[in-house]
Amino acid sequence: MQKIRTAVVGAGFIGPVHVEALGRIGVEVTGILGVSKGESELAARTLGLPKAYASFEEILGDKSVQVVHLATPNRLHYPMAKAVLNAGKHVLCEKPLAMNSTESAELVELAWRSGFAAGVNYNIRYYPLNIEAADMMRRGALGRVYSVCGSYVQDWLFYPTDYNWRVLAEEGGELRAIADIGTHWLDLIHALTGLEVEAVCADLSTVHSVRQRPLGEVETFKDKQEKVAVKTESIDIKTEDYGCVLLRFAGGARGCLWVSQVTAGRKNCLRYEIAGSNQALAWCSEQPNEMWIGHRDKANENLLRDPSLLGDKARRFTNYPGGHNEGFPDTFKQCFRAFYDYIKAGDLAAPQPFPTFADGHREILLCEAILQSHREGRWVSVQGGRP
């Protein structure tokens, strides 16, 4: 197969992360597209890319590009992913896949009919110890799952003066904390356990119903580093800062998820604890190279990420010896490696070893059930995940 060439759409926080990860696995990035000519040119220059694309249409028409990565605001995911597939290219999209399940169901169907690889970047699956945990589940090491509990908490929207386009329902969707980070947790738990959520009961809260929007947008996270006085305007916020969700899984397991973007001191902390009939597992993204294994009748264990201690599946996605930590940027690299190895293998009818559009659709259905549950104050059943 000829060398795969890729274009990246989005030059904010995540787009450059995609570019770096692609370079680490040997994928040639033809260029990048930002929200303006200036942003595109600056990103191309900073990242050492040969081209700053002038438009999305230019990328679609570039016959040398086989794959397009979408790292754009949520409302653009559906139309852009649809256009990429219709242009005859593979696509890897940031989450959430779409703004509603009608759009995401259409994308699942289109991806299936197109025959092209279509993935969603649920990168947290690819921490080596999460792959090991999933493998342990498949081997039956935990036994029957009793419960799955955890959280994903941050503080980057702690103050009412903190602002980003994600707080706007028209840009990011009616759910924010749940859709933005909660879906990472939900996808991870499904990837680890294989359990499907059957019903949810949610309670959400908007802590800051009014935020101060700068007169001129700021780059995600970057404004936390640069303390520059700017003029602002008050803006009403309807998306949630915080939420708790009770979960009922198929087969009888129970769970709970706590999500917050207003917890001081928690920069980017995902945690889970899975209780099984044989043992328990716990992991935290702030210490991603350690996994706690709990026992009733013998000493607990603390498994360190070391390829010599991991199973074959996790070892494949572990590139450094024990004691040489792997972290957030490596998860992008490994997710993309799974995606591109699949394309290179040439059998696009084979099982897909990466998060697919069907996985993205499942998360949209969960979000819709969570929002309905919160609004109606009751348990809500989750609709089937595949159209």
Image (spheres, helix red, strand yellow):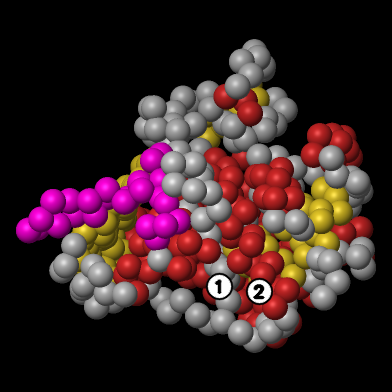
Measuring 70% from the left and 50% from the top, which residue is drawn there? 24
Residue 125 position within the rendered picture, expressed as x and y whole percent measured from the top left: 47, 59
- Residue kind at label 2, given as amino acid type: Tyr
Number of callouts in the render?
Answer: 2
Q: Is residue 132 left or right of residue 233?
A: left
Q: Quadrant of residue 68?
A: bottom right
* Mark 2 element type: helix
* Residue 342 disc label: 2
Query: Which element carries disc 1, helix, strand or loop?
Result: loop
Q: Position of residue 298 (x, y in %)?
A: 10, 55
Residues in magenta, as a range = 285-310
Query: Residue at horizontal 62%, vertical 25%?
Result: 223
Expressed as whole percent of the image width and height from the top left, the position of residue 335 reads 59, 60
Quick check: 182 above or below 242?
A: below
| Along the viewing direction, whichever of 62 and 47 lies nearer the viewer | 47
Whether 301 is among the magenta residues is yes
Query: Which amino acid, by three-letter code, is at mark 1?
Result: Pro
Which residue is label 1 attached to? 353
Image marks 1 and 2: residues in contact by CB distance under 8 Å: yes
Q: Does residue 78 show up?
A: no
